[in-house]
């Protein structure tokens, strides 16, 4: 099962700061809810893991990340991550391209395109939730990313952002996720402005 | 001779054939006192669970069992490597192919068994499964059966490399299993070339699953001291299991005891031999302890036998009046990764050649090509006789397509093509001899009962208002009761069946059969046959099935074969007993046998009705007062080799209304008339028909095993897989005619599968009929609200 996601995340900060975050793989992984880099193998290969908690059940994905391209001139990152849950019943591959684009008025935006392929139980049981879950993951990722960029700046806002980063949960909370999805569903249904899809 | 009041009273007391006797099985079931495989608990019993592949097609690079073996309570972790020395890592299938018991170097479908864990309890087993580390290398996946024979299609079965001969002849491609064809191709082509009218339609019969309430499982117990193996198993064919296990294990068949206890529905899902069974037996032999394996619902829907997945092209040639001249059919059959169909050995496409249906079609040709894909093996008959549902679906759809093309009424076109009553026994173009039928009468009765003309008038009015209403007709003929041993066998064993009856001195009786009930009510109905034949009350007749140590050899229950084959054996065994009883009666009454006549429950002297001996009296005499040269006892065994199949038929009509806004369908009326010949228990027949119609409704309206392009099975839980409850199920109306089978001892045919076979095309015909005025000639199942809504949009009527 394959899902394609395209997303543009507006960032309140200069493109150079955004690139500073994007070009550090540990920083990028830190934006991903529940994810962390556990080991750097060489210049472009890493090992990492993602923890997802849904009620009493915890799923842990372990895998490899490979940086295919990191281009400062075009501020573009291309990486491929492959992982399997530690019980061997599901696995996933993500091919991600992201770049930082300057916008009018000194700000910038993160333009991301990802192709996620999942196999096994997660595809069988969670297939229909894939798009919504990906939306939520990316939404949180975008928030975290923007906060990190903000924290690189100066002043009260930057400090607040840094504090926020300190306090964020270290794993994905499945139930909170589910709730966010339900809220989004109803917002879309009744034409709310903050829905995740245009 | 007229029947006297006394005879009626004595007949009623017997509760024999024709009586709606209450089911003997129900008291224990409704009190939760049934005894199913998962209820079996044995001292020292261990539990088996399987490590399954997340990939549909991958090479196994390594399996690391160490962590699992280190978990306290784990007794063994077995892989194909462990089974290899026993030559049990692969096993033969019923269809002449080989199937991996545990994945050998490669996995061929998602959820395939890669290893099994045997542990102290079910929970430890499940934990240990998570600890077995398997490293895979992904391979290209083949999901679409239509692409199986592409030149660049991935090679699925490396074990078959270089083998261009399969169990059923030449293999045309590395993913090809067999070509099976029947009929005269050249003649058929010629008729099509010159026909005035031809129609053709492509239809996909989706992959579905029988999904019985109870999943598959077993408890295997090997006694190391006695060298005997006992297997409690969810099997529709326990004797066949015993033979296969003996062949695989080398244990003498006399040392193997297979017991099918109460079974919570089979519907074809419990005919096959599954890796879980084999692994449990091996584990019990290796560990010397009883081993239980019971699959969960996800495993059941994902791995143990599916049904259908037939991709069919049907064509009819006709004259302008709608008289059919020829039928031509081509099928791509998706059998999954291993050909594990359960069909009589010589019939790789089952009895699909019944595809000419209830119609007098002079020329026909059918071809089926079986192919491998990266999906679970199977292709069983889900509540039907081997591939009959597929065949009936095709012909019942095609005749509607032809009616639409010629603008003929869908009932009228059937009357124009029916095999006439006077034509029976009827020789079909594809080689079957239909035993008996009266199709005209059946359909007329249904049309009158529902006021067909009135319905068509109503439909015309609704169409004028832009509303969607469909009327579907299905007039099907089944072929059931496999089967004559001259052409039907499984692994070389002829498909006869058997009954053994012992009448005790006090006039009660014990009977055992080679069949096995799974909800059909054999304990009730077989006793009724014996009651009528022997004049003993059915209440005093015990029926026992499913224990190979006590029951005579039989091929089991599937394909509606119990009544046509086992029921015939039962009647014949009873008749052997009655013949002996007549000798004893003659001796007791001091008359010649010829002077006696049978009268309900006794032999009486012709012309002197007061001189009589009841069967009860005769039974006692059989143990103490016998004529010269007659051995004591009153029992008989019969092995019945049917001279022909039986051909039950029916006429069904469905009326449905469709909500144009949502695509929701409401089945307003479903009228089912069945003719199964002699009716043994009308109440059980009605119950079976209700069940079959409900399962037919499930298939037509919602059931489907869906796969994505990566071979991930989507919808393998009951959250997605549609099992209708009382909420969704329509109200059924039933009716019947009686056209006995001329070759069956009691004239009975078989009924439990007819409603499944007949209702599915009836629903589709009704659905297509609702859209027929818009030029729609076919809609693939399932007719879920979403699919119907898509058709509404495609037809451009969603805004009107």
Image (cartoon, coloured by chain):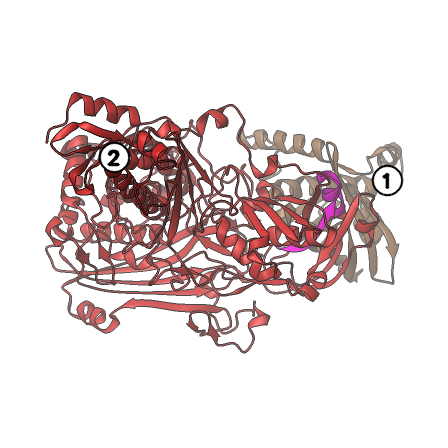
Chain colours: A brown, B red
Real-space Cα separation, disc 2 to disc 1, in angstroms? 63 Å
Query: Do the residues at pointers 2 and 1 share their chain?
Result: no
Label 1 environment density (alpha carbons within 10 Å; few <14, some 14–19, many ≥20): many
Q: Which element carries disc 1, helix, strand or loop?
A: helix
Which label lies toward us, 2 or 1? Answer: 2
Q: Mark 1 points at which residue?
A: A151
Label 2 environment density (alpha carbons within 10 Å; few <14, some 14–19, many ≥20): few
Q: In this view, does B131 lie above or below B660?
A: below
Residue B653 at x, y percent in the picture: 24, 38
Does B92 appear in magenta?
no
Location of residue B643 by image quarter: bottom left
Write down the chain letter for disc 2: B
Picture disc at residue B466? 2
Q: Which of A11 and B112 is in front in this view?
A: B112
Q: What stretch is highlighted in magenta?
A: B111-128
**Residue drawn at (59%, 47%) of the image:** B231
Location of residue A60 by image quarter: top right
Q: Nearer the viewer, residue B368 or B21?
A: B21
**Residue drawn at (56%, 67%) of the image:** B156
């Amino acid at each position: 099962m394959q899902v394609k996601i395209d997303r543009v995340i507006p960032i309140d900060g200069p493109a150079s700061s955004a690139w500073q975050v994007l070009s550090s793989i540990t920083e990028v992984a830190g934006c991903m809810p529940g994810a962390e880099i556990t080991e750097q193998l060489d210049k472009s290969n890493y090992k990492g893991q993602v923890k997802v908690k849904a009620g009493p059940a915890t799923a842990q994905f372990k895998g490899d990340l490979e940086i295919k391209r990191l281009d400062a001139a075009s501020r573009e990152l291309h990486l491929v991550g492959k992982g399997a849950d530690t019980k061997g019943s599901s696995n996933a591959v993500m091919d991600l391209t992201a770049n930082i684009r300057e916008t009018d008025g000194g700000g910038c935006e993160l333009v991301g395109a990802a192709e996620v392929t999942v196999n096994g139980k997660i595809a069988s049981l969670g297939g229909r939730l894939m798009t919504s879950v990906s939306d939520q993951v990316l939404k949180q990722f975008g928030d975290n990313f923007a906060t990190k960029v903000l924290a690189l700046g100066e002043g009260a806002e930057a400090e607040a952002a840094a504090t926020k980063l300190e306090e964020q949960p270290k794993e994905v909370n499945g139930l909170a996720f589910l709730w966010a999805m339900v809220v989004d569903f109803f917002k879309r249904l009744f034409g709310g402005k903050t829905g995740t899809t245009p | 001779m007229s029947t006297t009041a006394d005879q009626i009273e004595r007949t009623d007391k017997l509760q024999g054939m024709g009586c709606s006797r209450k089911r003997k099985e129900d008291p224990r079931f409704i009190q939760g006192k049934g005894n199913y495989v998962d209820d079996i608990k044995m001292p020292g019993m261990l539990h088996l669970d399987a490590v399954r592949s997340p990939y549909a097609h991958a090479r196994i690079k390594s399996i690391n069992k160490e962590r699992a073996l280190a978990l306290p309570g784990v007794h063994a972790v077995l892989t194909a490597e462990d089974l290899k020395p026993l030559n049990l890592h692969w096993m033969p299938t019923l269809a002449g192919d080989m199937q991996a018991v545990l994945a050998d170097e490669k996995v061929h479908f998602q959820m395939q068994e890669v290893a099994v864990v045997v542990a102290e309890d079910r929970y430890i087993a499940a934990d240990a499964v998570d600890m077995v580390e398997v490293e895979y290398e992904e391979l290209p996946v083949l999901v679409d059966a239509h692409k199986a024979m592409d030149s660049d299609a991935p090679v699925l079965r490396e074990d078959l490399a270089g083998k261009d001969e399969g169990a059923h002849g030449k293999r045309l491609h590395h993913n090809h299993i067999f070509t099976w064809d029947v009929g005269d191709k050249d003649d058929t082509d010629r008729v099509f070339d010159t026909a005035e009218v031809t129609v053709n339609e492509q239809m996909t019969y989706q992959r579905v699953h029988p999904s019985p309430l109870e999943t598959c499982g077993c408890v295997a117990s090997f006694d190391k001291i006695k060298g005997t193996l006992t297997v409690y198993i969810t099997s529709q064919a326990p004797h066949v299991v015993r033979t296969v296990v003996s062949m695989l294990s080398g244990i003498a068949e006399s040392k193997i005891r297979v017991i099918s206890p109460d079974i919570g529905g089979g519907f074809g899902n419990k005919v096959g031999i599954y890796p879980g069974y084999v692994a449990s037996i091996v584990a019990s032999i290796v560990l010397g302890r009883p081993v239980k394996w019971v699959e969960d619902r996800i495993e059941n829907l994902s791995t143990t036998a599916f049904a259908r997945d037939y991709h069919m092209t049907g064509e009819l040639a006709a004259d302008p009046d709608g008289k059919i001249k020829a039928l031509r059919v081509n099928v791509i059959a998706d059998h999954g990764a291993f050909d594990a169909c359960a069909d009589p050995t010589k019939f790789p496409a089952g009895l699909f050649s019944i595809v000419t249906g209830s119609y007098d079609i002079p020329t026909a040709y059918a071809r089926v090509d079986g192919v491998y894909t990266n999906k679970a093996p199977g292709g069983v008959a889900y509540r039907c006789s081997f591939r009959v549902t597929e065949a009936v679906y095709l012909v019942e759809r095609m005749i509607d397509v032809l009616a639409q093309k010629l603008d003929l009424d869908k009932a009228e076109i059937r009357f124009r093509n029916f095999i006439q009553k006077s034509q029976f026994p009827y020789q079909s173009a594809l080689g079957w001899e239909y035993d008996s039928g009266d199709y005209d009468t059946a359909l007329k009765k249904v049309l009158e009962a529902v006021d067909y003309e009135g319905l068509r008038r109503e439909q015309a009015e609704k169409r004028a208002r832009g509303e969607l209403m469909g009327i579907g007709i299905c007039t099907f003929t089944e072929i059931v009761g496999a089967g004559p041993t001259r052409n039907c066998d499984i692994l070389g064993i002829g498909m006869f069946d058997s009954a053994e009856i012992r009448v005790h001195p006090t006039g009660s009786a014990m009977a055992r059969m080679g069949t096995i009930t799974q909800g059909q009510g054999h304990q009730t109905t077989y006793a009724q046959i014996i009651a009528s034949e022997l004049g003993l009350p059915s209440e005093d007749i015990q029926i026992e099935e499913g224990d190979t140590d006590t029951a005579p050899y039989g091929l089991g229950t599937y394909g509606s074969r119990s009544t046509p084959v086992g029921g015939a054996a039962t009647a014949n065994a009873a008749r052997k007993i009655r013949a002996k009883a007549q000798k004893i009666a003659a001796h007791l009454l001091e008359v010649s046998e010829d002077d006696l006549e049978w009268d309900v429950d006794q032999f009486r002297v012709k012309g002197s009705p007061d001189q009589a001996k009841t069967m009860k009296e005769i039974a006692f005499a059989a143990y103490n007062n016998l004529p010269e040269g007659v051995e004591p006892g009153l029992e008989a065994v019969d092995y019945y080799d049917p001279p022909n199949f039986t051909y039950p038929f029916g006429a069904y009509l469905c009326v449905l209304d469709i909500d144009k806004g949502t695509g929701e369908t409401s089945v307003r009326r479903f009228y089912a008339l069945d003719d199964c010949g002699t009716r043994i228990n009308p109440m059980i027949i009605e119950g079976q028909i209700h069940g079959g119609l409900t399962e037919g409704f499930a298939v037509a309206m919602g059931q489907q095993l869906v796969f994505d392009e990566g071979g991930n099975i989507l919808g393998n839980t009951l959250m997605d897989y549609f099992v209708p409850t009382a909420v969704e199920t329509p109200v059924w109306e039933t009716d019947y005619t009686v056209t006995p089978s001329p070759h069956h001892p009691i004239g009975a045919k078989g009924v439990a599968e007819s409603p499944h076979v007949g209702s599915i095309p009836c629903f589709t015909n009704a659905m297509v009929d609702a859209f027929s005025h818009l030029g729609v000639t076919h809609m693939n199942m399932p007719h879920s609200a979403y699919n119907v809504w898509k058709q509404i949009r495609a037809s451009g009527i969603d805004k009107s």
